[in-house]
Image (cartoon, rainbow, N blue to C red):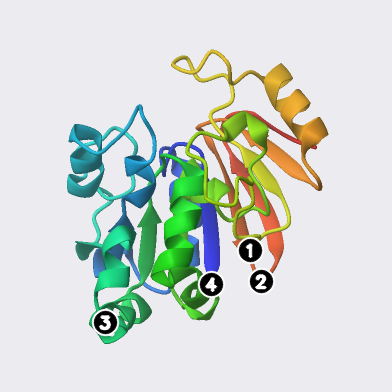
Amino acid sequence: MKLLLTSGGVNNKSIHEALVDMLDKPIADCNALCIPTAMYGHPWVGPGVKAWEFISGKEENPMVNLGWKSVGVLELTALPSIDEERWVPLVQETDVLLVSGGDALYLYHWMQQSGLAELLPSLRAVYVGMSAGSMVMAPSIGEFFVGWTPPSGEDQTLGFVDFSIFPHVDHEMLPGNTMAAAERWASEIQGPAYAINDDTAIKVIDGEVEVISEGHWKQF
């Protein structure tokens, strides 16, 4: 599976071109599934209007509204209550997974509970994460980002990549997300880490990592 891990979505030309290069056909020919689950666990986001904006492509962060052939919804909290044959073939056939921001630990929990976490490594789809949707791919998120607390009480996430991500650096709506805060966060993280702003993304293909940026970022 190819990963495009963004902070704020596909919101500049460089990130858009990186996404197009990762697909095996034009965006207009690709079927996508959007995953809004992380939003429900975050007090600033959803459920409610923000979740609807993401699913409908009405939000400012470009992901769902990039011109896909079709966009469906994959709600992870619903999957444990339905048979796998109802949803696994759908995921296996999709070209792109669009995973929203929100709470990374809530998303991780439901990726595990739903069975999606086990399925992900076998998929041919391009995985496009935004904020928490990107952070969940890391081994852990760090105490700075712990909001919803999982049953384990830990900040562990999927570990599909060997680095952690501090998103939204210097975002005007998040005054605590400074580069200095990111440096303190990184000093407590076990392993490599990146701080990225909303004009930056990290592309991962076959373990090869490339930073795509029209903004600013820092590797720790």
Q: Secondary structure at mark 4?
A: loop
Q: Secondary structure at mark 2?
A: loop
Q: CA distance from mark 3 to mark 2?
A: 31 Å
Callouts 1 and 4 close, C-beta under 8 Å: no
Residue 212 picture quarter? top right
In this rendering, which labeled residue sits more in front, label 2 or label 1? 1
Q: Work out whether mark 4 precedes mark 2 in sequence or the reverse, and give the earlier one.
A: 4
Q: Which mark is residue 160?
A: 1
Residue 186 picture quarter? top right
How far across and down, in percent of the image, does residue 147 sit? 50, 33
Q: Work out whether mark 3 precedes mark 2 in sequence or the reverse, and give the earlier one.
A: 3
**Residue of label 3:** 83
How far across and down, in percent of the image, does residue 171 sit? 51, 20
Q: CA distance from mark 3 to mark 4?
A: 24 Å
Q: Work out whether mark 2 precedes mark 1 in sequence or the reverse, and give the earlier one.
A: 1
Q: CA distance from mark 4 to mark 2?
A: 8 Å
How far across and down, in percent of the image, does residue 201 sit? 56, 44
Quarter containing the C terminus: top right
**Residue of label 2:** 206
- Mark 3, Cα crowd under 10 Å, few <14 / some 14-19 / many 20+, is few
Q: Work out whether mark 1 precedes mark 3 in sequence or the reverse, and give the earlier one.
A: 3
Q: CA distance from mark 2 to mark 1?
A: 11 Å
Q: Secondary structure at mark 1?
A: loop
**Residue 30 in sight from this viewpoint:** no
